[in-house]
Image (cartoon, grey):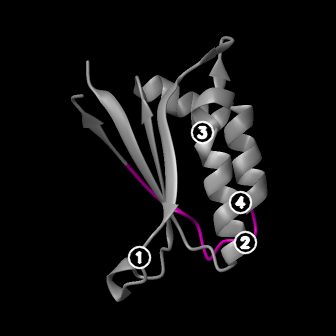
């Protein structure tokens, strides 16, 4: 079965917030649990290179899930993801851009 690879792009104007967000994502795959067990296969996030082609998006989070159901849980019920949302809410330039795809791994 294909895994779900999700990329979330942010416009974060505050450099200190960039570092704080990267730190939160670095522990997400251990802290996020579903039914008492970690369920995120990979969670990574990094600032982008400064380039006009980025259209102002300067931070990318990459998460890999076992299934679309796990990604839906992440969006709607995950407390660890809620903490990241709380950290970034009202501090980013516009809504994040989210894309996801099936990936054989």
Residue under label 1, please give it.
49
Report how far apart the C-alphas of labels 3 and 1 lie in the structure. 27 Å
Residue mark closest to the camera, 3 vs 4: 4
Q: Is residue 47 above or below residue 14?
A: above
Which disc number belongs to residue 20? 4
Residue under label 2, please give it.
16
Q: Which residues are magenta?
A: 89-99
Q: What residue lies at 50% left-to-right and 73% top-to-bottom?
A: 58
Q: What kind of element bears circle 3? A: helix
Report how far apart the C-alphas of labels 3 and 4 lie in the structure. 20 Å
Which disc number belongs to residue 75? 3
Of the numbered discs 3 and 4, the one sitting upstream in the chain is: 4
Tell me, yes or no, whether the two marked residues, 4 and 2, touch with CB atoms within 8 Å.
Answer: yes
Residue 6's spot in the image, x, y percent? 41, 45
Q: What kind of element bears circle 1? A: loop
Residue 35's spot in the image, x, y percent? 66, 11
* Predominant SS along the magenta part: loop
């Amino acid at each position: 079965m294909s895994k779900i690879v999700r990329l979330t792009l942010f416009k974060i104007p505050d450099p200190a917030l960039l570092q704080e967000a990267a730190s939160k994502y670095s522990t997400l795959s251990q802290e996020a649990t579903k039914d008492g067990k970690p369920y995120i296969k990979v969670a990574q996030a990094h600032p982008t290179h400064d380039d006009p082609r980025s259209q102002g998006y300067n931070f990318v989070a990459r998460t890999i899930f076992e299934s679309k159901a796990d990604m839906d849980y992440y969006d709607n019920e995950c407390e660890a993801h809620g903490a990241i949302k709380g950290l970034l809410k009202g501090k980013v330039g516009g809504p994040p851009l989210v894309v996801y795809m099936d990936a054989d791994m």
